[in-house]
Image (tube, coloured by chain):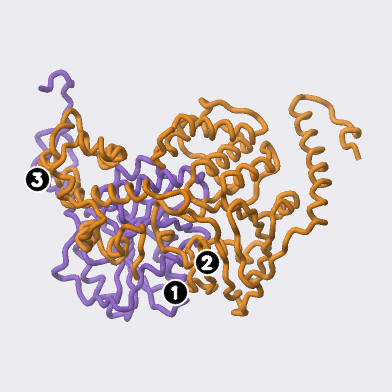
Chain colours: A orange, B purple
Amino acid sequence: MAFSLFKGIPKAFADPKGRGVLERYNNYKSKNMITVQDIQQKTIAELFEQYPFLPGFFEENTLQVNGRIDEKLIDYLKFLDDEEVAEDRAIDKDRLLASMTIYITQMLEFLGEDEDDGVHSISILPGTNKSGEAEQFGELKISKSEIVCIVGPTGSGKSRLLADIEWVAQQDTPTSRTILVNEEIGDKKWRVSSGHKLVAQLSQNMNFVMDLSVYEFVELHAESRLIENIEDVILKVFNQANELAGEKFELTTPITSLSGGQSRALMIADTAILSKSPIILIDEIENAGIDRKKALALLIGEEKIVLMATHDPILALMGDKRIVIKNGGIHKVIETSEDERNLLVDLERMDSVVQNMRTRLRNGEIIKKEDIGF
Amino acid sequence: MNLVTVSGPPSSGKTAVILKTIDSLQKRGLEVGVVKFDCLYTDDDILYEKAGVKVKKGLSGSLCPDHYFVSNIEEVTQWGIKEGLDLLITESAGLCNRCSPYVKSITAVCVIDNLSGINTPKKIGPMLKSADIVIITKGDIVSQAEREVFASRVNQVNPGASIMHVNGLTGQGAYELSTLLYDEKVEIKTLVGEKLRFSMPSALCSYCLGETRIGESYQMGNVRKIDMSDKKDKK
């Protein structure tokens, strides 16, 4: 089984059966890739200049440059020729060089990707349900900026549908579904590459676990994406998150002390703006401390394909379609009708009554029957 | 028989991931066995037995667990063949974070979890850096951003590896992993003559031989000292 991770990188490279970094590197000698010979005669300063993402690789692989920046890479790495040092540091020089060239090639590919090459749509072609019966729908195409809801009881197969999409199923999963990307058989690069994941996920169970401020957190994410105008992007995420959050927070607030609504607001803004994944899967959004309508508008504005597992009537009616899952299969696809949409107005009014009461309670006020207003 | 070595820090979710993956493999009619290596104690063998998996466990006790692994891997392989397995999975914890009991020609899987912190990829040696497949677990409880940052750090130390997210509780991703672990064309008969991907840490000092007393006069053999001098003293 050969997986092509990146367009320019040969199959042998990304093939899980090509064992170890060295073998992966050796399996592949062709034109698109930087080779060890290309980099080892350059000085570290030259390499850092040419590949601005390389210091991160040095850092992560515990290589300290300390004043040796003008040495050629090959000379800098001479310390690893001492067997004892190599054993102590647990670094194999050949493997390190191979890793470095693979990394440079990957990142160049990554930076060279054109936004227009992106995902405009995904299509789900029917497979079978748990009883082996064919799913009764034609082809379900979901385009950028569209919201599709997924409904059905727990255990009905919502996770499997999502997994099929993530794996770009090609009749090779238990449901035998096929997932098309831009109406074509999907590139298997989506399967196993860290930089190319088709689906980003947001669920109510997710928490922040890092000990960082909001600023540092978004900065870290932006850096990992090799974004250039980091400062602007951080502010954009921060401002958007505050637009969504009921209560405002600061750039200096530690992420672990954000409220549930604030956390969700930051996660949504960050995912909308900074995640490279074209599809966002949302597993419910709590009804407190966050403006859900604005949240969806933000995701649509950032041209994401939005899939939302929800049984909340307001969210469900905001969707363009809903997929009904039953017994492991897609039972039917319902388009949100004009009549249903009109209900949304009433639902939102009911919702705002509750939200207003919440605000008044927070402010220490007394709530009265008149607050209900209908 | 196919052989896969799975390792990863303690509590990263190796057993849960393997169990969910085996579930998918069994549905394809494959006979899967597991040999669990641990240090002092494990009852994971009971979990495997419950799942209808042929299992053996090995406790290294007072020996270095990874040295113990290499000393036994051939016997383990022969056991798997004798039992008529299609796929044998060995599971071992990388207790010192340096080792990798990975054999050059055998698919190597490293399991690490999102909760271990973003500096973890930097701290783990060949166990992570020389794996073919890296499984990241516990992604359901951290934010998307943290998952992405963690995965990119893993990619920095092992670019080109297949990096996958698997949820050991729900099994999300386990089916997909199972498709990477078995290849009917592969037929392993023996590991004699094969080589490890990286050497194991060596130590042969008085403490290896059971010494318990503290002090320079009790220290013999391969002993190394921390540099405790003040920085300014160094040239």
Mark in the foreground, 3 or 2: 2
Mark identifier at residue A219: none
User: Mark 2 or mark 3, which is nearer the start of the sequence?
Assistant: 3
Q: Please state which amino acid type lies under the numbered disc 2.
A: Ile
Q: Quadrant of the N terminus of chain B?
A: bottom left
Mark identifier at residue B52: 1
Residue behind mark 3? A81
Residue at the spot 43% in from the left edge and 80% down from the top edge: B29
SS under mark 1: loop
The image quarter in which residue A49 lies: top left
Residue at the spot 54% in from the left edge and 71% down from the top edge: A177
**Where is residue B230 shown, x and y percent of the image?**
18, 20
**Where is residue B166 shown, x and y percent of the image?**
45, 58
Q: Please state which amino acid type lies under the numbered disc 3.
A: Asp
Instruction: Tell whether label 2 touches label 1 (CB within 8 Å).
Output: no
Q: CA distance from mark 3 to mark 1?
A: 49 Å
Residue at the spot 44% in from the left edge and 33% down from the top edge: A219
Report crowding for label 2: few under 14, some 14 to 19, many 20 or more residues within 10 A (C-alpha). Answer: many
Report crowding for label 3: few under 14, some 14 to 19, many 20 or more residues within 10 A (C-alpha). Answer: few
Q: Are marks 3 and 1 on the same chain?
A: no
Pinpoint the chain carrying mark 2.
A
